[in-house]
Image: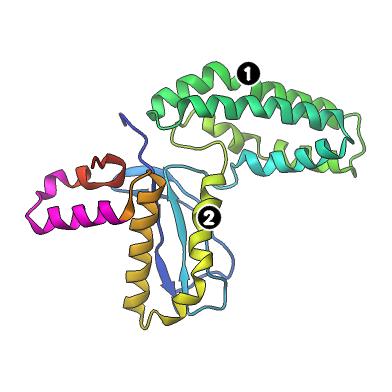
Amino acid sequence: MISRLATGLWYPLSTLHERRCRHPCKTRFRLAGSAFAGRASNPLGHDERFQITFFLLSRTYPDASWSHSRRKFYELHVAGSSRVATTTVERMAKLWQVEKTVRGQSPDARVAARQQASAAVVADLFDLWQQSLRRISGKSKLAEAIRYAVSRRAIFERFLTDGRIELDSNIVERAIRPQTITRKNSLFAGSDGGGRTWATIATLLQTAKMNNVDPFAWLTLTLQRIANGWPSSEIDALMPWNHAA
């Protein structure tokens, strides 16, 4: 059983010759014998020499972001054009309130809290949407927003039974921004090896930031410990989420 939710990022690099698709790819993969939910994106654009693919480990599931669905309803709520949209936004807010109370806890604890407080909210939302679809125009923006959510019900509900999955992908989008800002620097990586080194450094630094750890202090201490013969059997203790200054 995982006692604590580890948060990390992985930016693997592929060259133009290795690229298999020209659009952001999504995947579910395994790492160190454990299943992780992952979301991938290419923040460097499609015409650069290198593609730095972004993976957020153990935090999100492809297409399972409630925030994407919420935005569609929120636009209608702000416009004041739909009571259903307003009710949806209000009920969704309860889900994020639950997430605040379980952030950083073990997957089992997160599932228990979600089953107790979030499952009923989710069920009520889907009941509201299905009932509303029967009495509104299928061409309306509200119907479009509802169909987006209803068609993803199985995926949206996975966070209720898997404590590793986040409610939304906001953390993913925030983590992509630093690499987008430095996209021009990737043109000067110099070689495939240089590009992979850049991706490795980005992985280490951004993972440290996500765990509220000073990247420079953590990396300095970690390299010192490795140089001094830190045992490989205790390598987990060097991870950012286990770091203690």
Give the residue type that dot 2 points to: Lys
The numbered mark at residue 1 is none
The picture quadrant where one finds residue 157 is: top right
Residue at the left extreme?
A: 229
Determine whether 10 is above or below 155 in the image. below
Give the residue type that dot 1 points to: Ala
Mark 1 surroundings within 10 Å by alpha-carbon count, few (fewer than 14), some (14 through 19), many (20 or more) = few
The numbered mark at residue 120 is 1
The picture quadrant where one finds residue 45 is: bottom right
Which residue sits at x=48%, y=64%?
179
Mark 1 and mark 2 lie on one chain; the one further toward the N terminus is 2
* Element carrying mark 1: helix
Q: On the rendered structure, is 112 left or right of 4?
A: right
Give, as a single range, the part of the protein colored magenta.
216-234
Disc 2 target residue: 26
Q: Position of residue 140 (x, y in %)?
A: 89, 42
Q: Position of residue 79 (x, y in %)?
A: 86, 40
